[in-house]
Amino acid sequence: MITSGTLLPLDQLRPNEVGNIVEMVGCPVEIRRLAELGLGVGASIRMVRPGSPCVLSVGTGVNRRLSLRLSENVDILVSAVVPQ
């Protein structure tokens, strides 16, 4: 069972689970590109559809979705947010 604050790789989120990005490790060029898309440390994300590519909803209160093919060049760790 996932509890609030649990750190896990982005690809471990299940549909409709929410997390905050806490760390991104890997190729600086790819990390910068992801940050330009809104996927940076501190971003709130919701997994819409897992897989590769996965579909993410980025931000709170906005309807912005991204299709992202997870790369071996960047590891994204999220802190799970469990609704109370």
Image (tube, rainbow, N blue to C red):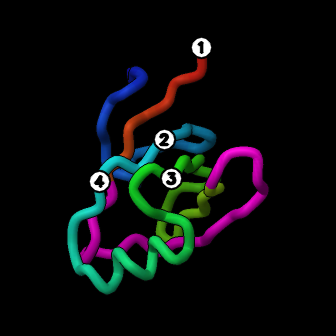
Q: Callout 1 environment at 10 Å: few (<14), some (14 to 19), or many (20+)?
A: few
At label 1, the amino acid type is Gln
Question: Does the stretch in magenta take in 74?
Answer: yes
| Span shown in magenta | 59-76
Q: Identify the residue under disc 2.
A: 19
Q: Callout 3 environment at 10 Å: few (<14), some (14 to 19), or many (20+)?
A: some
Find numbered disc 3 in the image and state the secondary structure of the residue it sits on.
loop
Nearest the viewer among 10 and 58 is 58
Disc ID at residue 16: none
Tally of numbered discs: 4
Q: Where is residue 30 in the image (x, y as percent from the top left)?
A: 35, 81
Query: Spatial distance from mark 1 to mark 3, Cα to Cα?
Result: 20 Å
Q: Identify the residue under disc 4.
A: 23
In front of the other: label 1 or label 3? 3
- Considering only order in the chain, which callout, 3 or 4, is on the residue closer to the N terminus? 4
Nearest the viewer among 30 and 16 is 30
At label 3, the amino acid type is Ala
Disc ID at residue 84: 1
Residue 19 higher or lower than 10, as above or below: above
Query: Spatial distance from mark 1 to mark 2, Cα to Cα?
Result: 14 Å
Residue 40 higher or lower than 26, as above or below: above
Q: Identify the residue under disc 3.
A: 43
Location of the C terminus (image quadrant)? top right
- Considering only order in the chain, which callout, 2 or 1, is on the residue closer to the N terminus? 2
- Considering only order in the chain, which callout, 1 or 4, is on the residue closer to the N terminus? 4
At label 2, the amino acid type is Gly
Find numbered disc 4 in the image and state the secondary structure of the residue it sits on.
strand
Image point (33%, 58%), residue name: 76
